[in-house]
Image (cartoon, rainbow, N blue to C red):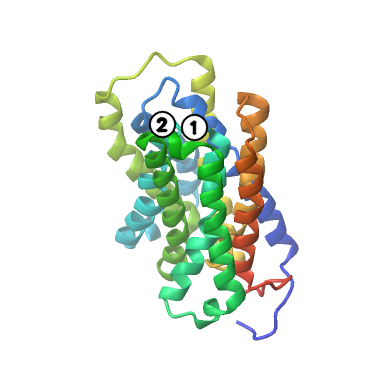
Amino acid sequence: MSGVATAVSGRAWTLYALMGVLWGMPYLFIKEAVETFSPAAVVAGRTLLGAVVLLPFALRARALRPALRVWPWVAAFAAVEMAGPFLLLSHAEQTIPSGLTGLLVATVPLFAAVIAVLRGDRSMLRPLRIAGLLIGFGGVAVIVVGHGLAADGPGALLAIGEVLLVALCYAIAPFIVSARLQNVPSLGAVTLALIGVGVAYLPIALILPQQAPTLRSSAALAALGILCTALAFIGFFALIAEVGPARAPLFTYVNPVVAIALGALLLGESVTPGLLVGFPLVVAGCWLAATGGRRRAPVP
């Protein structure tokens, strides 16, 4: 990596925009899907559908064999990026609004900064970065209190904890990709991971009771599998290759805007004062923690 900071490339900006939209939409789709499907069924459905979409392309590109050679790391990525987070999000959205879920997931850069510190990155200990961490997590506290979630009982607080755990998992996953899967075709790794997670959750999904699916919930699950899983993961790997694991999650600044807007417009979710105050605090905190106040982030 050059010691001179360079502007983010046009390809990187395109990928950031794509990921900002694709991973801003799933919270709406999850909220709709869990109306009739169990959380395990949502995970099984979106991963197996995503695998079905990608498998022909992976076979044609002969991308599965290289992924199979490092299957333990593919499994680790699948657990951290899919198996755990997908279930936690589906369970949490049975309790809390989709827009709030999207905003809480936007704390990924905060957790990425903490991980960088634990990995020995001394640059993360600069005052502005530390201030960013404090401001960002302070924004989460404002949202929880201002949204009245603390008064909603342990169920709401559990859901918030689940989503924050998802954010931590999402912060860890890019480091696995960069360190262990960098030379593995992304198409093969993603397809293999989706197959593994889908097969693991399918028996659970078949056993657990659920309501008869509606056209709306089925369409939401299909969108989750095709747009927010199959297509989004290909874009995610391409973004990691373009800008590195530490800066790849920066598209999460845009995700909550998409999630909150969709939740308010299509689901009638309320935009509370706590959300309006906490949202800029979270975004500002993430930006400071990730960039240290620089206008331009260097590309690795």
Q: Residue at x 37, y 15 (%)?
A: 211
Residue 216 in picture, x, y percent from top left: 54, 18
Residue 160 placement: quadrant: top left
Q: Amino acid at mark 2?
A: Val
Query: Which residue position holds label 2?
Result: 42
> Which image quadrant: the N terminus?
bottom right
| Of 167 and 185, the residue lying toward us | 167
The local secondary structure at tag 1 comes to helix
Q: Nearer the viewer, mark 1 or mark 2?
A: 1
Badge 2 marks a residue whose secondary structure is helix
Q: Earlier in the sequence, mark 1 or mark 2?
A: 1
Could you tell me if the residues under marks 1 and 2 are in contact, i.e. CB atoms within 8 Å? yes
Judge the density around disc 1: few (<14), some (14-19), many (≥20) Cα neighbours within 10 Å. many
Q: Nearer the viewer, residue 188 or 83?
A: 83
Q: Residue furthest bottom?
A: 3
181 left or right of 295?
A: left
Query: Which amino acid, by three-letter code, is at mark 1?
Result: Ile
Q: CA distance from mark 1 to mark 2?
A: 8 Å
Residue 27: image quadrant is top right
Which residue has dot 1 on it?
30
